[in-house]
Amino acid sequence: MAVSNLTATLPFVSFETIIENLTRKSLPRAVLLTSPPYLEAVNRLLEKTPKETIQAYLLWTTMRMYLGHTSTAVRKPWETFSKVLGGIDPNVKKERWKTCVREMDNTLGFLAGEFYVRKTFAGNAKERGRLVIEQIKDAFIDRFEELEWVDTETREVAVRKVKNLRVKVGYNDASPNMTDPVDLAKYVLHTCSRLMRTGITRKYT
Amino acid sequence: MKDTFFDNFFSYVQWATQKSLSSMGEPVDKEEWGMTPQVIDY
């Protein structure tokens, strides 16, 4: 449906304004709405909820996103709260290294991943892995030719689908190419230059 | 940019958010990876 129809379903939220302000792009021609009754219910709830409550909820949502990255003293009450909420003994302490590894994975995961793969699977393991998968794809296609219970039309679609499968082994060498510093720089800086243009960074630095 | 863990993380969130937003209206990048190499799905 069009974005205007989305706003008609949930008039409390101006999707046009939000999308235009966040992306500085023209509105998409169509958006997918998977659960209209849910949005209608959200709209009813927002309408009868005091503005102060909504504001507090938004603040709380933002805090929850960043609390894990604050100092021990600041995040302590939040950690205790969420442990009690989740039925965990508040005295149980999560091992610090788990937090650190997860942090690394979430932020620099793709960069770290390339080094991990290079170290763990030395030699031409990436290329060998790719070949194995290509052979499986070939074998799959060959089998389709032999299967009598598959009609021609279905077979053609199935073969096309197998051929469309993208093989992703080891680390990304296409988008971006992790081994190409120039490609990698473009990938990182593209977004940075956008940040500068929209002026979002200026407010915080 | 300040030299703290929080600010560092905040820069990452800005970067990732802008990256995600800028993909709106663009063709799907089928070569992009959705999962890092060190993550395993059994």
Image (spheres, coloured by chain):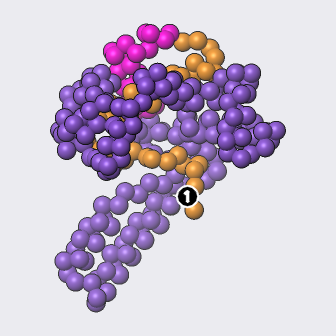
Chain colours: A purple, B orange
* Residue behind mark 1: B41
In the picture, the quarter occupied by the C terminus of chain B is bottom right
Q: Residue at x 49, y 11 (%)?
A: A204
Q: Secondary structure at mark 1?
A: loop
Of the pair A136 and B14, the residue shown nearer to us: B14
- Tell me where residue A175 appears, x and y as whole percent: 38, 41
Q: Residue at x 54, y 49 (%)?
A: B37
Q: How many marks?
A: 1
Check disc 1 and give the amino acid type: Asp
Q: Residue at x 31, y 80 (%)?
A: A144
Q: Judge from the rendering whether residue A169 lies leftward or rightward of residue A151; answer left or right.
A: right
The secondary structure that most of the magenta stretch takes on is helix
- Determine crowd level at label 1: few under 14, some 14-19, many 20+ residues with C-alpha closer than 10 A: few
Judge whether A159 appears above or below A44 on screen: below
Judge whether A75 appears above or below A179 on screen: above
* Region of the chain picked out in magenta, as a range: A181-205
Say whether residue A136 is visible: yes
Of the pair A21 and A102, the residue shown nearer to us: A21
Judge whether A10 appears above or below A156 on screen: above
